[in-house]
């Protein structure tokens, strides 16, 4: 009965100030809806990105040479063909491995110069990247073993320098070497220059890169696992291998983590605390009367905590419903192959975090109300 009475008093107090309660809960509504929406967007983006990555090359782990503009990295820090060989020979889960070295270059065709990205590729590159060959062919074993002066060019570059003519068998010059075009290609899925492949790129056998760089090194090392479940294990094994082959200060892998900050909930929590402090001041005489007729300290504190919980919990329910309704509505206008998943965990977390926020920030006003002296409270005007 005591809990029921406390709950009734708390509800009546909120009804007496409906507009204040609604305005206070808006922050909680925004915060809880944001949690559901952020997780939903993250899951949808993750699903889309994974599909794009798998189209480029699935189950991939890669190590990249991080170039610093202010200083030249020592050779001991650079990725090498020995790293690629060790990767294939010592890690059993590697299905394929390949490396690339790239640099800016100028292509000269019939006296016309064009800036391009020159990329030297090793065996296994096509197996990993799965480039679409539009004309001609890809490198064969003979091209790699004999260091043949042959190349493949991107579709954009072919159109730029050869127009509507067939580029297969035509010659292009890069530096002091002249190459024969044996193929035209494009990426399976456009990466918009975010990988080593740019709109106007030229692929050559990796051994020929030494003519330009003077070093037999790699900028990027790719490894392919047999399944998505093996990617994590392969990444750890690859990290250990590279650390054992290079000085500790050489950085090869970068991990990017996404952190979600619930700023709206923090602001709404502070708002709840401020409103509850005002409420305590306004109801000082009421608190004094209740304490004078024997209401214990726990009842007074419980009443104000329940009010804070009702504000935050009610806001959380509305926010979660909005967070669910928006993706359901958006799904109706999206293509059929792109689904918008709603995480049950995000709904539970949003509700719990919102309620805990309300109770946490409501504790100070509730504690202040419970500590009021009944005599002084009765004198308050």
Image (spheres, grey):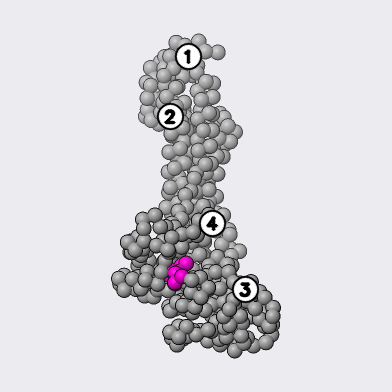
Quarter of the figure with residue 298: top left
Which residue has dot 3 on it? 106
Which residue has dot 2 on it? 363
Q: Position of residue 132 (x, y in %)?
A: 54, 80
Q: Was residue 220 drawn as part of the magenta stretch in this picture?
A: yes
> Disc 3 to disc 2, how far (Cα)?
69 Å
Residue range corresponding to the magenta coloring: 215-224
Note whether residue 227 is visible: no
Which residue has dot 1 on it? 377
Mark 1 is surrounded, within 10 Å at the Cα level, by few (under 14), some (14 to 19) or many (20 or more) other residues, namely: many
Which residue has dot 4 on it? 69
> Disc 2 to disc 4, how far (Cα)?
53 Å
Horizontal relation, residue 51 to residue 167: left or right: left
Quarter of the picture containing the N terminus is: top left
- Compare residues 236 and 3 and report the one nearer the observer: 236
Mark 4 is surrounded, within 10 Å at the Cα level, by few (under 14), some (14 to 19) or many (20 or more) other residues, namely: few
């Amino acid at each position: 009965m005591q809990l029921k009475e406390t709950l009734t008093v708390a509800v009546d107090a909120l009804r007496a100030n409906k507009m204040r309660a609604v305005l206070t809960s808006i922050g909680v509504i925004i915060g809880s809806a944001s949690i559901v929406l952020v997780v939903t967007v993250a899951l949808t983006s993750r699903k889309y990105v994974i599909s794009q990555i798998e189209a480029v090359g699935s189950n991939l782990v890669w190590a990249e040479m991080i170039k610093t503009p202010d200083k030249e990295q020592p050779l001991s820090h650079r990725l090498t063909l020995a790293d690629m060989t060790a990767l294939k020979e010592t890690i059993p889960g590697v299905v394929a491995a390949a490396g690339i070295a790239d640099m800016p270059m100028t292509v000269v065709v019939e006296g016309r110069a064009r800036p391009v990205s020159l990329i030297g590729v090793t065996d296994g590159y096509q197996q990993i990247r799965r480039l679409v060959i539009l004309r001609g062919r890809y490198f064969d074993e003979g091209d790699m073993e004999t260091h043949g002066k042959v190349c493949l060019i991107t579709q954009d570059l072919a159109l730029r320098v050869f127009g509507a003519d067939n580029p297969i068998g035509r010659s292009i010059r890069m530096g002091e070497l002249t190459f024969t075009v044996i193929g035209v290609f494009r990426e399976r899925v456009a990466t918009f220059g975010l990988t080593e492949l740019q709109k106007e790129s030229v692929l050559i056998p990796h051994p020929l890169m030494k003519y330009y760089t003077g070093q037999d090194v790699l900028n990027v090392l790719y490894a392919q696992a047999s399944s998505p479940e093996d990617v994590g294990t392969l990444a750890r094994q690859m990290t250990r291998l590279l650390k054992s082959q290079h000085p500790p200060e050489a950085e090869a892998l970068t991990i990017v983590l996404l952190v979600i900050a619930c700023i709206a909930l923090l602001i709404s929590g502070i708002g709840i605390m401020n409103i509850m402090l005002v409420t305590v001041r306004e109801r000082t005489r009421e608190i004094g009367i209740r304490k004078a007729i024997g209401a214990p300290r726990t009842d007074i504190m419980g009443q104000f905590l329940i009010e804070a919980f009702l504000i935050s919990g009610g806001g959380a329910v509305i926010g979660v419903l909005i967070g669910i309704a928006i993706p359901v509505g958006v799904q109706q206008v999206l293509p059929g192959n792109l689904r918008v998943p709603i995480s049950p965990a995000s709904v539970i977390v949003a509700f719990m975090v919102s309620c805990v926020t309300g109770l946490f920030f409501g504790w100070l006003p509730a504690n202040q109300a419970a500590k009021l002296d009944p005599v002084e409270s009765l004198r308050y005007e």
